[in-house]
């Protein structure tokens, strides 16, 4: 499998992370997204006319949406990551897209200088973090540490990168203890790999207190 990748992309990272957690070897081909914009080159547009990253190629199959890449990797290697019911997973995959459009865009604005209504995208991101915090708090009280149950699924991997990188876009995670506990749980899954801005070491910040 070949992944066309940009190391600072949250969407690319979720595919690299999913593959690492499943023990799947990827041939990673770096694409200079910024500043060269090589994802818009003629070669890349032949592969993906939408001109976006990541792109995953598995034989004759070409996938251009990260959610479909997560599904494909899980379906081929560890179906338990798909969860017990798609009705629990699919809304969070859609939610991950909302995080990308808000927190992800705020990060692109602050880190790479992309144009954005920074006040609005930060406001949208905070609203989504509050929704996630409330859900994860309910999950913890029910004895479940992940978005869709007691074990991680592709829903968690889809939502993790832009959430963890929120501070890069000027949105603090300090008000969200349940989210921070959830992120620690993901970092603790065997096979977890880092990206710039997302670290493995729990000592970088104290653990949130577990409220009763």
Image (tube, grey):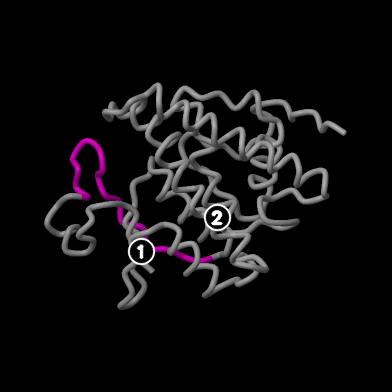
Label ID, residue 147? none
Task: Name the quarter where the N terminus is drawn.
Answer: bottom left
Q: Is residue 88 placed above or below 204 in the rendered structure? A: below
The reply to whether the C-beta atoms of the residues labelled 2 and 1 are less than 8 Å apart is no
- Left/right placement of residue 172 relative to residue 69 reads right
Q: What residue lies at 19% left-to-right and 47% top-to-bottom?
A: 38
Q: Magenta segment: does it hold 38?
A: yes
Q: Under tag 1, what secondary structure? A: strand
Query: What span is colored magenta in the figure?
Result: 24-39
Provide the residue designation for mark 2: 91
Q: What residue lies at 59% left-to-right and 66% top-to-bottom?
A: 86
Q: Magenta segment: does it hold 198?
A: no
Work out whether residue 118 or residue 6 is closer to the camera in this orientation and state it: 118
Q: What residue lies at 47% left-to-right and 65% top-to-bottom?
A: 25
- Left/right placement of residue 128 relative to residue 109 reads right
Horizontal and vertical percent for residue 20? 54, 58
Number of other residues with Cα within 10 Å of mark 1, as a class: few under 14, some 14 to 19, many 20 or more: many
Q: What residue lies at 65% left-to-right and 24% top-to-bottom?
A: 175
Residue with the most extreme right position = 212
Q: Main secondary structure of the magenta part?
A: loop
Number of other residues with Cα within 10 Å of mark 2, as a class: few under 14, some 14 to 19, many 20 or more: few
Task: Name the quarter where the C terminus is drawn.
Answer: top right
Horizontal and vertical percent for residue 121? 41, 29
Disc nearest the viewer among 2 and 1: 2
Provide the residue designation for mark 1: 56
């Amino acid at each position: 499998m070949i992944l066309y990748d940009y190391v600072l992309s949250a969407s690319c990272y979720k595919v690299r992370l999913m593959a690492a957690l499943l023990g799947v070897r990827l041939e990673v081909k770096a694409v200079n997204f910024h500043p060269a914009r090589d994802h818009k080159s003629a070669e890349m547009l032949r592969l993906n006319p939408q001109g976006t990253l990541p792109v995953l190629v598995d034989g004759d199959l070409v996938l251009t949406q990260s959610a479909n890449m997560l599904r494909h990797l899980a379906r081929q290697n560890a179906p338990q990551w798909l969860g017990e019911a798609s009705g629990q997973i699919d809304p969070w995959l859609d939610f991950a897209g909302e995080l990308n459009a808000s927190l992800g865009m705020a990060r692109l604005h602050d880190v790479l200088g992309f144009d954005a209504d920074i006040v609005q995208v930060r406001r949208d991101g905070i609203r989504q973090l509050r929704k996630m915090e409330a859900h994860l708090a309910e999950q913890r009280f029910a004895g479940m540490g992940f978005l869709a149950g007691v074990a991680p699924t592709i829903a968690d991997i889809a939502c993790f990168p832009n959430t963890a990188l929120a501070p890069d876009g000027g949105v603090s995670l300090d008000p969200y203890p349940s989210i921070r506990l959830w992120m620690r749980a993901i970092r603790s899954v065997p096979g977890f790999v880092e990206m710039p801005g997302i670290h493995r070491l729990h000592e970088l910040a104290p653990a949130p207190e577990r409220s009763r």
